[in-house]
Image (cartoon, rainbow, N blue to C red):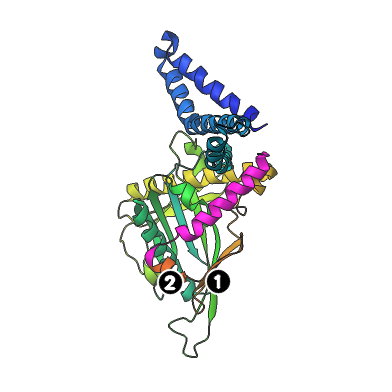
Amino acid sequence: MFREKLQPFIDRHEEINTLLSTQEIASDIKKMTALSKEQSSIAKLVEQARAYMETADAIEENKELLGDEELGDLAKEELSELEPMLPQIEEEIKILMIPRDPNDDRNIYIELRAGAGGDESALFVEDIFKLYLRYAEKMGWKVEIMSSSEGTAGGYKELIALVKGDGAYSQLKYESGVHRVQRVPDTETQGRVHTSAITVAIIPEVDDVEVDIKPNDIKMDVYRSSGCGGQSVNTTDSAVRLTHIPTGIVAAIQDEKSQHKNRDKAMKVLKARVYEAQMQAQLDEASADRKAQVGSGDRSEKIRTYNYPQNRITDHRIGLTLYSLDHIMNNGNLEQVIEPLTAHAQSEAIKAAGL
């Protein structure tokens, strides 16, 4: 049964090899690029499929030799090595057969917003941003702050950053949602633990051609940038707010001194948000796909709790609890949470695909 599912991939890979060697494809750059891309996308799966079949065949051959006086012992020895390999290859193949998220290789915008908890919430936005910075550094990614609004006692009421690097979306896509923190604030004289929350949104960056926004669909407002506590940081109307009229989606940028630069940044953020809204609408329609996710990606969903007194981090979607909050926050060891989330998502996707 498993062989039957693998054979079409092997056949298609061989078919593409044949097509790429023809004059017709060689003279058509568009077709050649599309075929090469398809070949690359299934190459690892085909390699594992062949390894699976070769291993399965070798197991059968050795089983037939078990009763042979001369070769029986050798066959038994070979089987002890081959049989544990088969389920391992099978699991790798199942993961490779999961339909790939088309956004996985994209750069991302991380949007962090303070929620319930006032000043403490704004301070936690800064703490989580530092966590992502440390993790990005470990991954070799680049981070650029697009827009920020400081809190009255430090931290950020809102912060938007662009993260550029291989697999940024695939690694951080499960971060969207409400992050709750439980700790004793610096301003707390009685030593009481306070609970506050922030929201995180992970939005894939899109190319200009992928989201077509007509000029007539955009309303642009300009205003004077303001700093902490409403203090003016610029004497000209350089801050820009763009509104996508059909959806009501808004993007506002004020960090640059140039109105033109702020508009360019706001347009990039606006396009990413419109794309994300379209993507979310498609997910809402495809209930089966939604079940295969870790959570829904809904920003109102409480996904994680950071409990400082207990040095505990808990991801509520998969029931993961780790007592290493200090190491995760201070060293950017976010993979301790991301890897179990990814494994769970893969397991659910395998079930949903009936593999």
Quarter placement of the C terminus: top right
Residue picked out by circle 2: 326
Tell me: residue 94, above or below residue 4.
below
Dot 1 surroundings within 10 Å: few (below 14), some, or many (20 or more)?
some
Q: How many marks?
A: 2
Q: Could you say where residue 172 lies in the image, as x and y percent from the top left?
A: 48, 53
Chain part drawn in magenta: 331-355
Q: Is residue 101 visible?
A: no
Residue at 46% x, 18% y: name it.
17
The residue lying toward the viewer, choosing from 283 and 155, is 283
Task: Tell me where residue 130 sits by quadrant.
Answer: bottom left
Is label 2 in a helix, a strand or a loop?
helix
Residue at 55% x, 76% y: name it.
195
Q: Is residue 217 left or right of residue 33?
A: right
Amino acid residing under circle 2: Asp
Q: Which mark is residue 5?
A: none
Is label 1 in a helix, a strand or a loop?
loop
**Residue farthest to the bottom, as pictured:** 190
Task: Tell me where residue 30 sits by quadrant.
Answer: top left
The residue lying toward the viewer, choosing from 187 and 213, is 187
Q: Could you say where residue 341 lies in the image, as x and y percent from the top left?
A: 55, 55
Cα–Cα span, label 2 and label 1: 23 Å
Dot 2 surroundings within 10 Å: few (below 14), some, or many (20 or more)?
some
Residue at 44% x, 51% y: name it.
109
Tell me: residue 146, above or below residue 96.
below
Quarter placement of the N terminus: top right
Closer to us: mark 2 or mark 1?
2
Residue picked out by circle 1: 116
Tell me: residue 115, above or below residue 203.
below
The residue lying toward the viewer, choosing from 237 and 323, is 323
Amino acid residing under circle 1: Ala
**Who comes first in sequence, dot 2 or dot 1?**
1
